[in-house]
Structure formats: C-alpha cells, structure tokens
Amino acid sequence: MIQATGLTKVYKTGKSEVRAVDGADLDVNPREFILILGRSGSGKSTLLGMLAGLIRPSSGTVRFKGRDIGSLPDPAISELRAREIGFVFQFSGLIPTVTVLDNVLLPTLFIPARPEARSYALDLLERMDLADRAGAYPRTLSSGEMKRVAIARALINGPSLLIADEPTGDLDAYTEYEIMDLFRQLNNEGMTIVMVTHNPDLEQYATRIFGMDRGRLVERSHVEHAGQGVMETGLLRYRMP
Amino acid sequence: MNSLFFRLIRSSLANRPYRNIATVFVFALIAATLFSTQFLMKGAEQSLDAGISRMGADILVVPEESSMAGQSIILTGQPTSFFFDNSGFESISRIPGVAKASSQVYIATLFASCCAAPVQMIAIDAKNDFTITPWLQENPGVKLGKDDIIIGSNVIQNVGKDLMFFGHNFHVVGILDRTGTGVDNSVFTRIEDAHVMAEESGTRAVRKLTIPYGMVSAVLVKVEPGSSPQVVAADIEEHVQGTKTILREGLLHAVHGQLVATLQLLYGSFLAVAIVSIPLLGTISAMVANERKEEVSIFRALGATRGFVVFLMLAETCALAIIGSIIGITTAAGVLVIYQDYITHSLNIPFVIPSGVAILADGTGALVLALGIAGIATLYPAYLTMRAEPYEVIRGGES
C-alpha cells in the first residue's frame, strides 16, 4: 500500500544539521497494523508526516498505491489525503469553534459532496458512543471523547490507511484501552494502520513493530495474530468506490 | 458550496468579535467615502441635467459682464437682475445652427411671504418660449395667462393661491418638479406682466423696480439637430458683441470647480483610508492567520488544498468587507439624503438624489472596491500560512 524508500529529513539550524529521519525504509501492506515505537524526538512523527505528504523529505521517496506522492501536485496529494488517509493526531486536533458533528464532517468538504455524509457522520458518532454529543462543542468533551471524535473524523471519507500519531499519549490507562480497542476493531475489519507511540505496552495490538532511534527505523518483530477480520463493527462500511 | 463551509466562516468570525468589528469599521469607511464621492458627483450632474433640461436650452446667451450671475441662476438660483439690449436677439436668431431663440428677463425679487429669501423671477417671452411651454403641454389645463406664475419646487405656495412680488399679486397656476438647481428657487411669469409689475412698483413696493424696455437678461438658444452647440456658441460670441455664452459643459465645469475642494477632501480621505487600510487589514489578517496556523494545518492534513485554504480566508475577509460596505454605504446614503439641503447650501452646488440605478451602481462600485482591498489584504497572510509545513505546525516543532 505504501512504500517509503531512503526517507531522510534534515533540519538545518544555523550551521548545525539535525537528521530527524535518516534513510528510513518502510513497506506497509494492506490490513497491517504497523506500530513504530520510539522516544520523544526520535523522528517518528516526522516520518509519519512524510508518509502522509505533509512534510517534504530532504531525500527519498514515498509511494502510495504505486504513486510517488512527492511528484504529485498539491490538488492531487490533497485529494489523496482526503480520500485515502485518515489522520488521528496526538492532540485531538478538533476545530473548537464548530460542533462535534461538524468536526466529523470536516474532511467531506475536501471531496465532492455526498448527500449521505451527514447520516454516516451521525452513525459513526453513535458507534463511538457519542451520538448525544453531536451538537456539543469540543471544549465540553473529555480527552477520550475528543479522541473518539477525531477517529470518527478520520473515518468519515472511508480511507484505506489510518495514520495515528501518539493517539493515546495524553490519555489515562482506561481510555487508552478503549481507544486501542477501537483501533484493533478497525484493523480486524481490514483497515491498514500506521501508528507511532512511545508506549511499549501497545505492541500487543500491532502486526509489525518498528523501533525508531535518532532518526533510524528498524523492524523489530512480525506478529501474525492480528488483522484477520474476525470482528464486524460496521465502522468501515463507508468505503469509497 | 457545502453549508459547513459557511458555518466555518460564521463560527470563525463570531470567535473574534473585537478584531472583526475593527475590520468592519475600516471597510465601512472605505465604502462610505467612495460612495459619498460618487453620490455627490452624480447628484450634481443629474441635477444640472434636470435644470438645463427644464430651461430647455442648449446655449444661454447673457451679457458678457454677467456670465457668472447667469450661471448662478441655473446652478443655485442666486437672485440677480441684469439686462442687455434685445437688439442682439434678431442677430442670434439668424446665426446658422440656431433652431429657436427666446428672450428672458431675470428679476431678483424683494422678500416675499413664500420664501425665507428673495427668489429669482424669470419673465419669459411667451411667443417664442421653450422653457415653460413644453411643461404646459405636458400639463393640459394649465395656462400661463395674465398675472399667472409657475413656481419652482422650493417656493412655498399652493396652486390656486396668490403670491405678491413688488406689490403685484400673482396667481400660482403650477409647480415645477424638483431639479435641485436654481430653477427650484425661481418663479416664471410673462415679460408683459413683469413690466406691469415694474411700473406699479413705484407706488406699491418698498423699492421701485426698473425693467428697461427693449432690454432682456438672456437669450436662450436651441440648436438645430446635427449642429454643434460649441460652434454655434462661438459664432454667437463672435457676431453679437458684448455677449457671453453658457453651455452645459461650462456649467458642469463650474459645478466641478465648486465641488473640487469637497471632492479632493473625499477622494483624499478615500485614498488615505484605502492606503492605510491595506496594510492595516493585512496586519489583522496576518495576526488571525498566525493564530490559525494550526487550524489551517489540520485542514491541510485532512485533505484541504492550498486553494481551499486561501478561498476560506478570502471568504472570511470578504464577508467582513460585505458587512462593512453595506453599513458604510447605507450610513453615507442616509446622511447625504437627510442633510442634502445643508450640503447643497454649504457647497453651493445643484443637487438631487441620484436615480436608483445610479445609487445601485455607486453602491456596487464601492462594494467591489472593498472586496478588492479585502482580496489584496488577505493574499500575503494566506501565502505566509501556506509556506509552513502543515505537520510541523501541528506538532509545534517536535520531531
């Protein structure tokens, strides 16, 4: 689904250079749950940004379903993000001035209008156990609720890849479990997930685990048990044609 | 366009009330100054057209030394009396290109019960007249007979009532439509009645009026179709010594001259506001853009194109520009309409409220300009916002 080859990102501050990501190679297959583990500042978020075309690499390429995203013009790469990639940020990334429902609907602005989008957004919120909060503003939600809204937003356009950047970093243990369980369900239904975290306890959810240290990406283990589509939640029924 | 787009704009604007009020105020000022300038210009021009059309002449021939007074009669109705030998009338009638010529006598009245100040009496040559006659034809049943007068819209009296000038009673038979020019402050009667009034004034009025026989104040000329008023006017000045011709263009020029200080002030204010507003609005937009860098980056991460983000920012500023312009234009229009008499008097210009089409055109022009400024002011902040790497903004610089 997505292949990164020799991905490097160098930041220059004055005369010194920082290699945030140093020659990372990554090949993500459909239905995989990739976990990238690393400490703060190891370069894992920069890697995610480059995979999604949100950070320009200093060198290397990213191919998404065979297309080199570095060579795509802005409208094409934006459309790819809108249709194919769902993003869950470390902080909820919700727009505070609009309601929960509008936050979920936000990515639908960037693709051709679909009349059923609103009912699907409400459906997603119901499945996230947030149906009664559709008209609420983000400031009135708990951290876990915000995160679930962000996941609903990431799923609204029926993406094939979910990218999650430390999605449980600011959550308590119980909420973390809830969110990770949700990710597991999504993966079981066939959603490809690439997630970065500094928490090694989350390894159990992944099919493949990478470690990242000072910009270098190393595969650590390959697990066969996950991603077999054993549960059916209906969360992914809204796949794009 | 998705209704969510408009909800985003509304919520974003509602979230920054003070800054947006300042922005709306700037746009209101821009639109109001431009609209006022155009409104005054069009009002003066339309008024002048109405006044000239009322007089029915292409050229007004007056004594050389009284050209300014002649202009004032049409422009502001400043009452005046002046005469020249009517023998020139025959010469004027014979000049090539002259279709019709008609003499008029101008008399500044004394104070009358109708009016706070003396008015201009215009005595017409009923036989050759083309000033009042067309109006009489449009108003069948009204006749300008012995001791009858037709009054301008600013002269306060009703049809059927009398008005006394120099001790002579005149019967009001008609009221002319408002033109905004001196015609509104004038009363029209026949030359022969004016002579009777002058003869009687020695015994009936506090001051004797003298209208010398064989003298007139002006000769109004209508040129033949296809003839140039300028050429005919030059011929008249050449062939009839001691006369000066007044043309529509000359009157317009005079009005522009009287308006020049006000227009310079308004255009100057407009330019100053426009010049100051672009960087000011740009700064406000840049501040907003800086605050919204993270929000914009989230949009980009979710699939928004650069074009969408620029469009969103433009739409927000344009919404403020539209609100500001509507407030500015309606306020300016309200002030100009309510104080039109004061403006006319203090600027000494002819003025009528411009036609609805002209007001709409001026309002649209001011609105388009405000939108243009909004666009220019938004582009640079939008560019700054676009330059940042979206994901680095979201992450706040962490790697």
Image (tube, coloured by chain):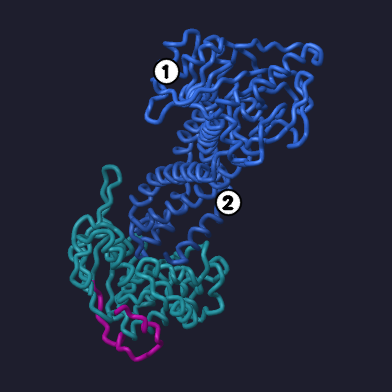
Chain colours: A cyan, B blue
Label 1, on which residue?
B95
On whether disc 2 and disc 1 are found on a single subunit, the reply is: yes
Q: Earlier in the sequence, mark 2 or mark 1?
A: 2
The magenta segment is A219-241
Which amino acid type is shown beneath numbered disc 1? Ile
In percent of width and height, residue B115 lies at 75, 27
- Decide whether residue A223 is among the magenta residues: yes
Residue at mark 1: chain: B
Foreground residue among A212 and B208:
B208
In percent of width and height, residue B248 lies at 48, 26
Left or right of residue B14: residue A7:
left
Q: Quarter-wise, where is residue A46 in the image? A: bottom left
In percent of width and height, residue A80 lies at 28, 68
Label 2, on which residue?
B17
Observer able to see residue A176: yes
Mark 1 surroundings within 10 Å by alpha-carbon count, few (fewer than 14), some (14 through 19), many (20 or more): some
Foreground residue among A201 and B264:
B264
Left or right of residue B303: residue B203:
right
Q: Secondary structure at mark 2?
A: helix
- Decide whether residue B173 is among the magenta residues: no
Q: CA distance from mark 2 to mark 1?
A: 70 Å
Foreground residue among B386 and A142:
B386
Which amino acid type is shown beneath numbered disc 2? Pro
